[in-house]
Amino acid sequence: MGDLSGKVAVITGAGRGLGREEAIQLAQQGARVVINDIDLPDAKAAAEATVEEIRGFGGEAIAVYGDCADSGDAENLMKTTLDTFGDLNIMINNAGFCRDKTIFGMSDDEFDSVVRVHLRGHFVNMRNATAYWREKAKSGEEVYGRLISTSSEAAFYGSAGQPNYAAAKAGIIAMTMGAAQLMIKYGITANVIMPRALTDMTASGGTAEMFAPPEDGSFHKFDPVNVAPLVGYLASPEAAKISGEVMIVWGNQVQIAQRPTLHEPFINPKGEVKWDVADLHSTLANHYDENYMPVWGGFSVPPV
């Protein structure tokens, strides 16, 4: 099960954390792995260490450095992958970082830089991969394609101190769902994972205490290694019928997110097409009074 022998996988942000564990997982399943990370000393050292670890157990891996959100660097990543291994089958977008602030304290650069790396970083690499697979399919060649995007539950629930990160992660879901619809005719899948994991990024985002491992050193449910098997499965032939899904993964749990659902509509009691403010208030106020709990000086939130 999960045999990826001969397949070629690109993982962005793969020197450390989630990306590293995903790269090792796919290599253990037989994939030839391209580890992409930023061209900075610490990141390069981590990427090279991951490459050597994979080669140490007989796997194939190379490192390609560059900015995942830069079109030129992304094109070089694609070219180097094809020049080295002759194909691309699995694109895992994982790279990201945090610059947390509340919305009234966030600078333009703190917003733009995070959205750029997370959302644009997904876009340019998804564009390159899907264009390559489409051209192969149009030429009559057999295509094996898997897109795996990395989002966060912040996309669902918001994050008061992460308006940049939450917005980018919501955009990743929307973009991946569109890719899933577009590429299914070629037999290509596109899915989103939402990992709960202790990594350099989550620690820098101020969540280190929440994710702190047990003092007794026991196996930790937020270890990034726990996320990797789901990525290995979604990349595998066995997951060919799974596409357009969002999955939360951590510890020994995988949850499939349900599509958003709409409440039953409220109908204008006067039967008119256009509401007036008074009727909206009497209708909606009753609903919120009956179903929601007042907090924060009168604001309403749904019951847990």
Image (cartoon, rainbow, N blue to C red):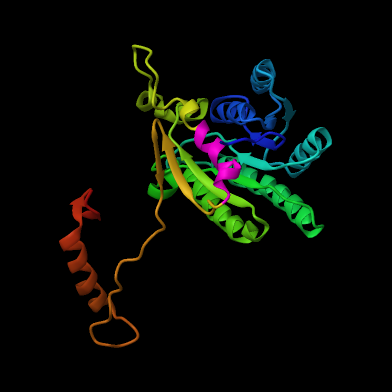
At x 62% / y 35%, what residue is drawn?
A: 3
Determine the residue located farthest toward the front in the rendered image. 1
Query: Residue 35: image x %, image y %?
Result: 68, 29
Above-or-below relation of 136 to 79: below
Q: Give the range drawn in magenta.
A: 228-240
Above-or-below relation of 23 to 179: above
Query: Residue 83: image x %, image y %?
Result: 84, 36
At x 66% / y 21%, what residue is drawn?
A: 54
Query: Residue 191: image x %, image y %?
Result: 54, 48
Picture quadrant where residue 90 is located = top right
Determine the residue located farthest toward the top in the rendered image. 216
Q: Which of 63 and 98 is in front in this view?
A: 63
- Whether residue 285 is visible, yes or no, is yes
- Whether residue 115 is visible, yes or no, is no
Residue 96 forms part of the magenta stretch: no
Picture quadrant where residue 220 is located = top left
Above-or-below relation of 177 to 281: above
Q: Please, what is the dominant secondary structure of the magenta stretch?
A: helix
Q: Is residue 217 left or right of residue 1?
A: left
Q: Is residue 82 left or right of residue 240?
A: right
Determine the residue located farthest toward the left in the rendered image. 290
Q: Quadrant of the N terminus?
A: top right
At x 42% / y 29%, what residue is drawn?
A: 206
Q: In this view, does 130 lie to the left or right of 108?
A: right
Q: Which of 106 and 52 is in front in this view?
A: 52
Query: Residue 121: image x %, image y %?
Result: 64, 43
